[in-house]
Amino acid sequence: MKPVLEQATAADLDEVALLYDSINRYLADHTNYPGWKKDVYPAREDAENGVNQGTLYVLRRDGRIAGTVILEHKTEPAYGTVDWGLDLTAEEVMVVYTLAVHPDFLGTGIGKALMEAVIAFCREKQVKAIRLDVYEKNSPAIGLYKKYGFSYIGMADLGYSHFGLDQFELYQKIL
């Protein structure tokens, strides 16, 4: 059965928080492409905010949350420093945040399923573009985004240099 993107509820918070902890533990022991850190990002508070704002979505496989993503219309202030090539309102743009796959599901197609579900969701919502940022050294994520037709727009400093994350690549997919 194909995984389905569902809006997360308060009942999902514990499992999403465990997913974030599992990812951060995994990244601490392996190449940490996104630069995420336990108790910094992503953390339970990010999941709680996503549930409260109705922007956190989960993808289940075999009854477990295998992946998550936050989808919202709000962009980072640094997004205004580049030319996106289109003059769109916030409501015409969906921004992808915190796309995450549980380590138990790495290599099983959950990342691809998340991207396909995000694109289908955005088409259904009739947004005109999907935008995102990715740490410049996160080559697996960059490869995934390019595979799904996202175009490189430019570089931006999102203000995370104190975490060693100096530059982020910005991508956009026109729908």
Image (cartoon, grey):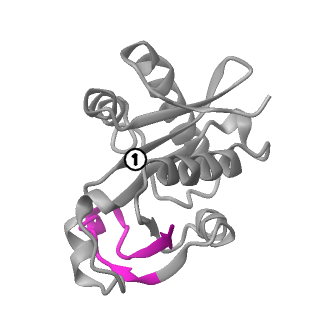
The N terminus is located in which quarter?
top right
In this rendered view, identify the residue nearer to me: 105 or 130. Answer: 130
Q: Position of residue 55 (x, y in %)?
A: 35, 38
Task: Answer above or below: position of 116 versus 84.
Answer: above
Q: Position of residue 112 (x, y in %)?
A: 70, 51
Pointer 1 residue: 71
Examine the structure image and report whether residue 170 is included in the region drawn in magenta. Answer: yes
Count residues near mark 1 (Cα–Cα under 10 Å), then give few for <14, some for 14-19, many for 20+. many
Say what secondary structure mark 1 lies in.
strand
Give the residue displayed 70% in from the left and 43% down from the top.
110
Q: Position of residue 22 (x, y in %)?
A: 56, 32
Task: Answer above or below: position of 26 versus 173.
Answer: above
Count of marks placed on residues: 1
- Farthest residue in the top direction? 11
In this rendered view, identify the residue nearer to me: 93 or 61. Answer: 93
Is 78 left, or right, of 25 in this rendering? left
Which three-letter amino acid code belongs to the residue tagged 1? Leu
Q: Position of residue 16 (x, y in %)?
A: 48, 27
Examine the structure image and report whether residue 26 is included in the region drawn in magenta. Answer: no
Asked which quadrant contains residue 90, the reply is bottom left
Is 149 left, or right, of 156 in this rendering? right
Give the residue displayed 38% in from the left and 57% down from the top.
95
Magenta part of the protein: which range? 153-175
Asked which quadrant contains residue 47, the reply is top left
Give the residue displayed 42% in from the left and 47% down from the top.
37
Task: Answer above or below: position of 7 versus 126.
Answer: above
Task: Answer above or below: position of 161 versus 51.
Answer: below
